[in-house]
Image: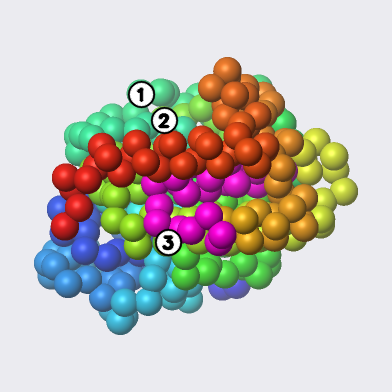
Amino acid sequence: METSYTLSVVIPMYNAEDYIGICLDSLLNQNLKLDSYQIIVVNDGSKDNSKAIVEGYVKKYSNVILYNQNNSGNGAARNKGMELVKGKYLYFLDADDYIASAVLDELVSVLEKKNLDILGFNSINTRSSHLNTSKTALNIRALEDYKVKTGVKFIAEHNYRAEVWWYIMKTDFFRSTGVVFYDRKFVQDSYITPTIFLKAERVLFIPHDVHRYRQNDDSITHIKAPAHIRKHMNDLIFAVKKLDALIHSVNDEPCENRLKNRQQGYVFFFLIRFAKSDMSFRALRSILSELKAIEAYPIRHFIGKDYHGFKYRVLVFVLNRSFLRAIFLYTYRFAYQQINKNDRP
């Protein structure tokens, strides 16, 4: 691929008028020349003032690009952004998140020095829009202390984060994986990221403070609408099935075990979400039969180094036994409905 830039940042955007300016400001407040990196915003049919805000940046900054499309979903927006990428390195950032000042040049230096396919870093959860200064100082000379690994070994040895904004990647490498994003609202990166990692030869994680994940009351744990919960549950099961294909493609037992742990984690959280949903118990039994066929249920690989608390152990014991599971889910659902009955329209 002929590259015109060192770095491309792809931002899918939908109704982000309260955040997109902060996101773009953070990307522009870097120690990189404007002609060395591009910022690609894919407007996925926003109905608020997001488009106009970005148009203002396009007029002012030569490296900001806006592409408008009809609402097609986050995955389609990322895929369209990839078509416009001309950078040697690639980063996906959500429109409501942002990054610390003056970190991108450091990350590019590490990518170049170590000849990496993937570089990971730290993120901070926050409600603030002003955490602009990185809390860590990156010592390039100390990089020798950090070991480059294959993606398979990285998955096996780390409680890796699935969200793609934890990582900057070499664009040619990403394209060589053949990965495309699906039109799924939730947990899409849960199978996209490990798919990429399994093909990577050179992966490095550095404990450098870079990304800010914005917490807000619109998160999946706060929205109680039945359709929203059902969508989340459907996407969790989709992720479980996608991970099954990955698990069967791996010949490394520690890596396989980590992927099974993640897969059954999604089964666990699917069952917890079920108690808050309007899905019938008959439908649940049908789904569990499908999961048994691919050995994703009963939950045998969830408890381990990543999840080992007493609460998780008790819940897994209950959820794996049909009689106890039924009592627990019926009771949980009844209590949840009583607590939230005043919130119903």
Per the model, the C-alpha gap separating discs 2 and 3 is 33 Å
At 56% from the left edge and 42% from the top edge, which residue is drawn?
326
- Give the dominant element type of the magenta stretch: helix, strand or loop: helix
- Indicate which disc, 2 or 1, sits on the residue closer to the N terminus: 1
At 53% from the left edge and 48% from the top edge, which residue is drawn?
270
Q: Residues within 10 Å of mark 3 (few under 14, many from 20)?
A: few
- Indicate which disc, 2 or 3, sits on the residue closer to the N terminus: 2
Q: Position of residue 25 (x, y in %)?
A: 22, 49
The residue beneath circle 1 is: 135
The residue beneath circle 2 is: 209
Q: Position of residue 52 (x, y in %)?
A: 13, 70
- Magenta segment, which residues? 259-283
Quadrant of the image containing the N terminus: bottom right
Quadrant of the image containing the C terminus: bottom left
Q: Say whether residue 275 is magenta.
A: yes
Dot 2 and dot 1 residues touching (CB under 8 Å): yes
Q: Residues within 10 Å of mark 1 (few under 14, many from 20)?
A: few
Q: Residue 289 versus residue 141: which sits nearer the camera?
A: 289
Q: Please identify, in this view, whether the residue under mark 1 or under mark 3 is nearer the observer.
A: 3
The residue beneath circle 3 is: 231
Amino acid type at circle 1 is Lys
**Can residue 114 be seen in the rendering of this structure?**
no
